[in-house]
Image (spheres, rainbow, N blue to C red):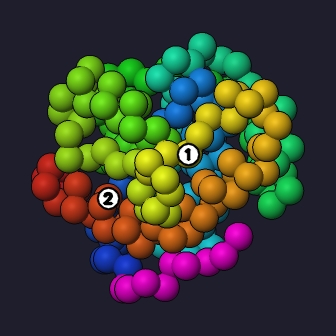
Amino acid sequence: MGDHSSRGPIPNIESIVPGILFICTANQFRSPIAAAYFSRKLTLMGIPGDWKVGSAGTWAVDGLPAHPAAIAVAAKIGLELGRHRTREVTKKLIDAADVVVCMQPGQKESLEAEFPTIRGRIILLGSLGNLPGNEIPDPAKDSFSHPDATAQMIYNCIDEGFTTLLRFVNISNNDQGNY
């Protein structure tokens, strides 16, 4: 877990209250880990403001806990997912987010089709870490046999793309004129 956030100055975001929503399929592994890790990174980097950081799933059943593998792998680096409860992506969540971060290209395409107003505010997490296909694979596809590897991809992409995400949020806020 390297820290690659020193790739340029962090934009002045003191005057905004940004919202970022991480999306995966079931909202039980990838997106809750990404939201928790991003939130902690904001704190560790001393980024000011009251950030709204959340997660949801494209095929989530509301109210389920995080997958046990997610809880275990997150705990290894001090992230707490025990109180996480799943939620399905809704128009209300999309509208409240300044930026939406997806794990897979198919999720991005589906969300853009269902919620056209999201165009220009959506990004693939894997693109920030130059992953093949810009994708963070779903660990459920291999019965969670490599949860540490999936979590490490998430951490690396957030570390490598942290400043980019901050800029993306700032640009989105300025374009929307919300703040």
Q: Relative to residue 50, is residue 141 drawn left or right? A: right
Q: Which of labels 1 and 2 is toward the front? A: 1
Q: Earlier along the polypeptide chain: callout 1 or callout 2?
A: 1
Query: Where 62 sits versus 103, above or below?
Result: above
Residue contact at pointers 1 and 2, CB within 8 angstroms: no
Q: How many numbered tags mark residues here?
A: 2
Dot 2 amino acid type = Val
How far apart are labels 1 and 2 at the CA level?
21 Å
Please state the horizontal and vertical placement of residue 79, each as a whole percent of the image: 76, 53
Q: What residue lies at 23% left-to-right and 24% top-to-bottom?
A: 113
In this rendered view, identify the residue nearer to me: 26 or 50: 26
Please state the horizontal and vertical placement of residue 65, each as a whole percent of the image: 74, 25
Q: In this orientation, does residue 8 appear?
A: yes
Q: Which mark is residue 169?
A: 2
Q: Find disc 1 in the rendering and name its residue.
A: 136
Residue span colored magenta: 1-9
Secondary structure that dominates the magenta span: loop
In this rendered view, identify the residue nearer to me: 31 or 107: 107
